[in-house]
Image (tube, helix red, strand yellow):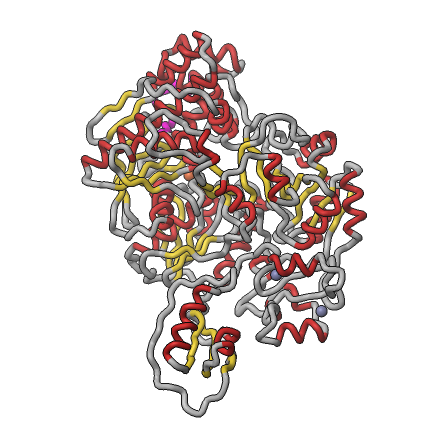
Amino acid sequence: MYRLATELGLVGEVSNDSLGVLVDASGRPEQLDALGRRLVGEAPPLARINDVEVTEVPPANGVEGFRIVDSRAEGAPAVAVPVDVATCADCLRELEDPADRRYHYPFINCTNCGPRYTIIQSIPYDRASTTMSVFPMCKDCRREYTDPADRRFHAEPNACPVCGPQVSRPLEEAAADLLAGQILAVKGLGGYHLACDATNHEAVVALRRRKARDDKPFAVMVRDLDEAGRLCDLTPAAEKALTSVRRPIVLAPKRAGDTGLSPRIAPDLPELGLMLPYTPLHHLLMAAVGRPLVMTSGNLSDEPIAHDDADATTRLGPMVDGTLTHNRAIHIRCDDSVVRATPARDSSAPLGVMDTDRAETSPGRVQMVRRSRGYAPEPIRLFAPTPHQVLAVGAELKNTVSVAKGQNVIASHHIGDLEHLAAYRSFLQAVDHLCGLTGVTPEVVAHDLHPEYLSTKFATELDVPLIAVQHHHAHIASCLVEHGRAPDAPVLGIAFDGLGLGPDGTIWGGEFLVADLHGYRRVGRLRPVPLVGGNLAIKEPWRMALVWANEALGHAEAVRYGQVVDPRWPAILTLAERPDALLTSSAGRLFDAVAALLGLRTVVTYEAQAAIALEAVAAGAPAPDDYEVDIHGGDLLELDPSPLVARIVAERDRGTATAIVAAGFHASLGRAVAEAAAALARAHGLDTVALSGGVFQNARLTHHVETGLRVRGLDVLVHEHLPPNDGGVSVGQAAVAAASVVLRH
Ligand code: ZN
Ligand code: ZN
Ligand code: FE
């Protein structure tokens, strides 16, 4: 503002207040027009302009020049806490310029880039309230910081080699250790990574062993887009995501042939998670190493990522050969975000066609899988302001928490699976920190219906009015928020998910809901079947395969299947046949079952591994969509995949290629889901269908359902910016609570 206004010769002042930026400028009409135009057109990369409001005021008389006045701190803060941003082009140029005073300085940053969320301890956001407060600026840095014309004017983490943070050892030395096959703990922006040479198979295998991570894929950092393109097929959307200032990990199809990477990086998967360097330290390290590095979260198995130095030494020390750390503290942990690039497809293509050849010509999509560093805590706009401040505590797995205040929902970074004590501790910190940063004092707390989730238990112990939001209603609500849907504009929601408690005491996960933000009514579901072994059903897909074989083909076939896969089958079958067995309509468990019946995975080492394998094996195969699925009408429509399961077993026994059977499962189920949803939408006078739940991370199923709905003339809302999985649940909960009337007692 200051630079533009002085360039244009305007007089007046600019300030921040709790609502945003306030400009008071006087000049000729054409000067003021130019200001309005250039303000939007030349906004710095990180500026976020929601609205520009112009009011005529009397001209300022006797004022000379343009000045910046001190921020008005009155009122609760509503201005967003900024996200962490990848190193900008200007800083990179200086980083590589031997004449620059920050040549090869691993902490170079400016107002357009650098750490933000991860170093902010409290608001208002200025240097004193960040972990940079322990580094007093030198004279040169101070001059930049106080000069409105400088790129580093009020760059709170501003630093240089004279006054700023330092790395623990020379980067060239760390690079040499990595090239020699060592595993290093590398302190980054939101936590520590475990790093090793991605082309060194022994190092990758050792990393898996030490981290106790069997199969779950590792992310790979590459130096630039060219190197990324040598490893993966990138759609324009994937390239855009990779190079964006948010720098997420991008899941994209591996290139065929030998890329030189260890096959243990993403075992049995057709995709690889790539990211580009996002801190100067990464840029320097990648240049020194000159080859792709595995950069996986610094943790043991599924624990939260280590971000605190002492904790990292304790937890990561035994896993690594060395450390590359620095003395700029990370205040709040923040994992790398993950997006999935889905193949470019023509949604007008006939049913059953998967057009992967068009990837070259159409941009494709990226879909959020884990929304964390670079995205959190950027506000998500609500349709209307919330009458009360809300805290939403999320689900149990892939937990995030959200707050709602004014017209915004602010979701936290990724917290993790609360069944781990360390993650629960991290959850408590995140709740405190997010409320503190946003100035939210919860007046309503939204939680899941499930009484045993630790997040629910936490909520019920607070002395604040509560709103229990059904899990799948929250999923659909998150999709409605993402698409800016009015709170009282109902859609037909298809929630295809893992497990979530329904109000009837059964475990839901394949539901058709007439829903808006005020409420929902279930109008359809997948046929419920016994859920045997509770959480073990997730880890051991053969159990649900046994159940579905029993349902679809009868006892004898179930016995035949059970005998082949696991000696414990008689006990499971007995449980499944008990009249009081707990029932589930989960779509996620159906995918697990089909994957197991096809022999892809009978046990898994990470959530949804079997379903991912089922989608992967179908790649490139013709997709028959004529496998039968029963749809029964009635008050509650029921989609019964029994004939589909029976057909799959028959095709398997007949020796049909697994790829074709898997593709046929996706296409046929997708066709039936679209058909059922379209009938329900028609019956309830709805023209829009929203897809949410973790199963819609499956791009193939999403494609079939979406296509089937569009050809029937329906609008389809799919996730792009929020994860369809449980990471998005807290946003949906917050939106439902914001739209509801709360009765106080
Ligand atoms: Zn910069
Ligand atoms: Zn300095
Ligand atoms: Fe869910």
Q: Is residue 582 above or below residue 725?
A: above
Identify the residue shown where x is 47% and y is 19%: 659
- Say whether residue 258 is visible: yes
User: Who is closer to the viewer here, 133 or 229?
Assistant: 229
Position in image of residue 299 (x %, y %): 64, 42
Q: Is residue 467 above or below residue 302?
A: below
User: Which residue reaches farthest bottom?
Assistant: 62
Q: Is residue 55 left or right of residue 9?
A: left
Position in image of residue 508 (x %, y %): 36, 34
Ligand 3, what quadrant?
top left
Identify the residue shown where x is 48% and y is 20%: 596
Identify the residue shown where x is 29% and y is 26%: 639
Q: Is residue 324 left or right of residue 661?
A: right
Q: Which residues are magenta?
A: 574-585
Q: Is residue 218 above or below residue 84?
A: above
> Does the stretch in magenta take in 313?
no
How many discs mark residues in the rendered view?
Answer: 0
For the C terminus, which image quadrant?
A: bottom left
- Say whether residue 72 is visible: no
User: Who is closer to the viewer here, 572 or 48?
Assistant: 48
User: Which residue reaches farthest front?
Assistant: 30
User: Who is closer to the viewer here, 505 or 27?
Assistant: 27
User: Who is closer to the viewer here, 123 or 711?
Assistant: 711
Position in image of residue 233 (x %, y %): 55, 34
> Does the stretch in magenta take in 581?
yes
